Image (spheres, rainbow, N blue to C red):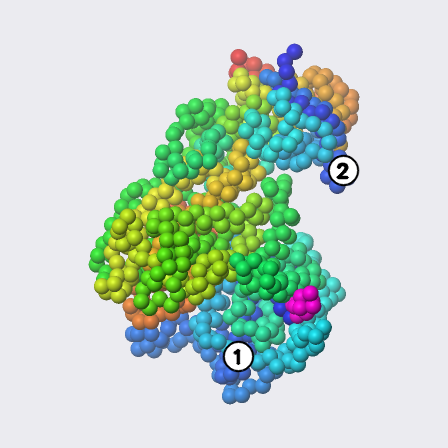
Amino acid sequence: MTKNILETDGLTVTFGGLNANDSVDLAVPEGTFVGLIGPNGAGKTTFIDAITGYVGMSAGTATFDGEDIGALKPHERAGKGLIRTFQSLELFEDLSVRDNLLVAGYPTKWYTFILDMLHMTPKNQEIEERVDWALDILNLTDVADAMPTDLPHGRRKLVGVARALAAKPKLILLDEPAAGLDTTESTNLGRQLRTFLDHDMSVFLIDHDMGLVLSVCDYIYVLDFGQIIAQGTPAEIREDPAVKAAYLGEQAGEVQAQEADRIRESQQEEVPS
Amino acid sequence: MKELIIALIAGVGAGGLYAMLGAGLVVAFRGSGVINFAHGAVAAYAAYTFDELRENGDVYLPWFDPIPEFGFLKTLRINNLPVKLHLGEDPSTWLAVAVALLMSAFIGLLMHFLVFRPLRNAPTLGKVIGSVGVMLYLSSIIAVNFGGQNRADVGFGGFTTDSPAVEILGGTIPRSNFYLLAAAVVMGAAVWALYRFTRFGISTRAADENEKGAALLGYSPQFIAGANWVLASVLAGAAGVLFIHKTQPALFVLFVVPALGAALFGNLSSVPGATVGGLLIGIAASGGVELADKGWWPAWLPAEGVRNTVPLLVIILILYFRGDKLPIRGSISIGRQPRAPESNNVLIGLGVCVGIAILLSNIFVSSWEAILTTSLLATLFMFSLVVLVGYLGQISLVQFSLAGVAAFTMTRLAADGTKVRPNDFFVNTGWDLPDPLAALGAVIVATIVGLVVGIPALRIRGVQLAVVTLSAVIALEDILIRNTTLLGEGAKSTNPTPEPSWFGQYVGAFNPDTNRTDYWKYTAFLILAVSLVGVAVANLRRGAMGRKFLAVRANERAAAAAGIDVSKTKMLGFGISSAIAGIAGVLFAYKLPAVSSDNFSVFAGLALLAFAYLGGITTIGGAVIGGLLVAGGLSAETLGVHFEDIDVAYINAVGAIGLIINAIVTGGEGIAMLQTDQGKHILAGLRRDPTIAPPDSVLNLTQEEIQGDVEGALV
């Protein structure tokens, strides 16, 4: 039994009397790939906002790496290795793609600005390499010096994921990384996502692309109206009647399941590891 | 206690003015989404128009003759733009009122069509620059057209200087104070009713809520915006005319600060709220001033300071508690920011600039050296804006006041209680610190004050931060800069600068041999400072912390997700910027035989901000260009040779026009960015070259607009 990198206990977020998250108990075991699905407005992004500190929790606890993070500010949680991406792009548009990644990875002290001004900030080889790796894994190396605004939407989305990778996450929270991607990009992304696990991190994925979620996740939670209505392995989720009713629909479920099989097969073909 | 109550009641007079101005600000904001920093200036222009017509029968149109009758231009006999109209020898008061109100309406129309309509889709930053530009333009035009002399208008109707006193609790309050209260309430109620019950008002409210929806229902959002601009300006003009018997018209320009407090009290949307807010601010300020007269009141907090601190506190409290540490999901983004590229070839550029500066300082004799150092000082100061506004995206209007704080602190720390120059009026007692320490101490004090002023920026963003920092300018001037208890007897007029001597070397600008400010060691000292700070600021952009600054500017939410402590980063930016402003302030003081608060006035600060934007606020090159453009700097004085005695106000007016055009055309990127790719697209678009497609974000310009920009650059 591995320990849980992230655990929430009764996590509740209330917006003016409405429970956007209602007593959510969820766990991400270390080194695993966990997914969260649910229809629009189910409270998925609110859940990520709550555990990363962007909205306050009304009740419950969130534990990250064995520590209660409820009182920490967003950047402090990020500093502990809890790194998120955003559904909307939220890139640093004035910085090149490479600098977008470097911002996230570079440690600064209060006196760094003095070194900067003297042009003496030491290069951090480890982080430069990490940035190169993150660019490489998401096929962004060729646009490293481009500005994000010059890229097509799909690749900008990947810059967001790469930026999170560069920040050396222990747990990476991906908020709909495949939204807005075309089928090829989405399949490619699915292939890469599993390899994240080989780099000392766990992955938590929210996405609408059911094919993607069912194919890459080890374990899936289903959220509806702020409550977890089902959880289990992809195979169990696929067969769960409550999930079918709330979200997949009989027909759609079949299509998505076939899609998942197709992605899984293509992964096995091209990524033998 | 009795005096306090009387003072509180008397406060309804000023409160009435703030309420009327605040209501106008709400009207303009609802109609167009612009917080109009120029609102007080409109009131001032109307008040001047009223007084000028009564005194001399003249009406000055709100522009200046583009070809001043100076020097050789006089002989050109070009058909000049008409400025002055003579309406007869002794016009009636009511004609003067009507003309003043018509003038305000006209200015409102001009603002709508020339500035805010073109800016309607601009990012917040563009609108702020545009509105600050109008404020600077109108105050410069007031200086050009109406001059600096005092006015003594007695007012009209019941609103007169000899208004009979009302006796309350044994004290007396002029009856006109209550008329002002009544006028504010009547005006507020009328505007409220207009919005509540008329078709025009309902369509304004509809367009305010949802512009596209209103357009679909057949209302023209642009007509609505224009009509609201006229209404807002007429309200400003009425306030100006009704209050003229109480004060100098020039002061109206800065009454926009308490008016902003009033408008924020009404959440920028409620006219009754703004009316109540204005009255409360007037009452509180009047009560505060009364308390400041008491024996137990600390001497270091002067009464004038209290009057101007009340609106600052109101504004900060309202905005701070409404703000969030991080913008919430889906909140309106601040829009595209001007790009901030890394400066390449810093050393080469620096070498060229220093070489030219040294060359100029050797070629130019006497006053030319003073002109060169004016440009250098402006550039040095603008580096502080590059860090804070350019890199970090915090629109602060207060930085030049921090330069003033440093300058005055330096004179206090370095003074030794002896007369510096035979003709000094004041003798400053001080700490008698050696100069490097006095300068260091002054920079540290400016940095600390800058950090305190920066605290609201942790929760207040964009245009609201501009509002807070503008109100901080007014408060700082009275609390710190003109504070005789803290900064020496001369703080209200002039504080003599002790002869600066660094490690035995005299580095002041005043040359006793020539009796001019052209001492070469000062120029060299300044060139050294500009070079060091310039390289440091350019390097900052390339370093790890500079990247974080830009990340915070671009997106605070994402910056926090990347592990950046947004609050600390902002504080660091305010600290660095304030320190640079402090350095500029100290070196400015070294140039002057004595520092005066006029050297650091609001308008001097706004003009510097305008020229910094015009040059390009995001780069070192932009600051250099901005420094060249300022009044009294190299480019203006080069032309000034031909214009003999060109007025500072002309240069500032032209700078303000350049600023507005810059906001409309480039979103505030400035001249330095015209050489980059996007700049080339702009120029290509002008030439209507079909082979180069301009990017979406660039507006197509007309020939006149670019010409204006180029003219702005040349003056």
- For disc 1, the chain is B
Q: Residue B641 placed where, x, y %?
A: 29, 68
Label 2 marks which chain's residue? A
**For residue B387, above or below residue A89:** below
* Quarter residue B270 falls in: bottom right
**Magenta-span inclusion, residue B2:** yes
Looking at the rendered image, the quarter that the N terminus of chain B falls into is bottom right
Q: Nearer the viewer, residue B195 or B212?
A: B195
Identify the secondary structure beneath mark 1.
loop
Q: Disc 2 vs disc 1: which is toward the camera?
A: 1
Q: Residues within 10 Å of mark 1 (few under 14, many from 20)?
A: some
As drawn, the label of residue B152 is 1
Rendered-image quadrant of the C terminus of chain B: bottom left
Q: Is residue B533 left or right of residue B248?
A: left
Magenta stretch: give its range. Answer: B1-12
Residue B594: say if magenta: no
User: At numbered mark 2, what does the secondary structure look like: helix, strand or loop?
Assistant: strand
Count of marks, rendered view: 2
Instruction: Point out which mark residue A18 bears.
Output: 2
Question: In the rendering, at what x and y percent does residue A95 appear?
Answer: 46, 38
Q: Amino acid at mark 1?
A: Ala
* Residue drawn where x is 57% and y is 80% of the image: B154
Q: Residue at x 51, y 70 (%)?
A: B250
Please say if A244 is above or below B95. Answer: above
Query: In the visual, does B379 lie left or right of A52?
Result: left
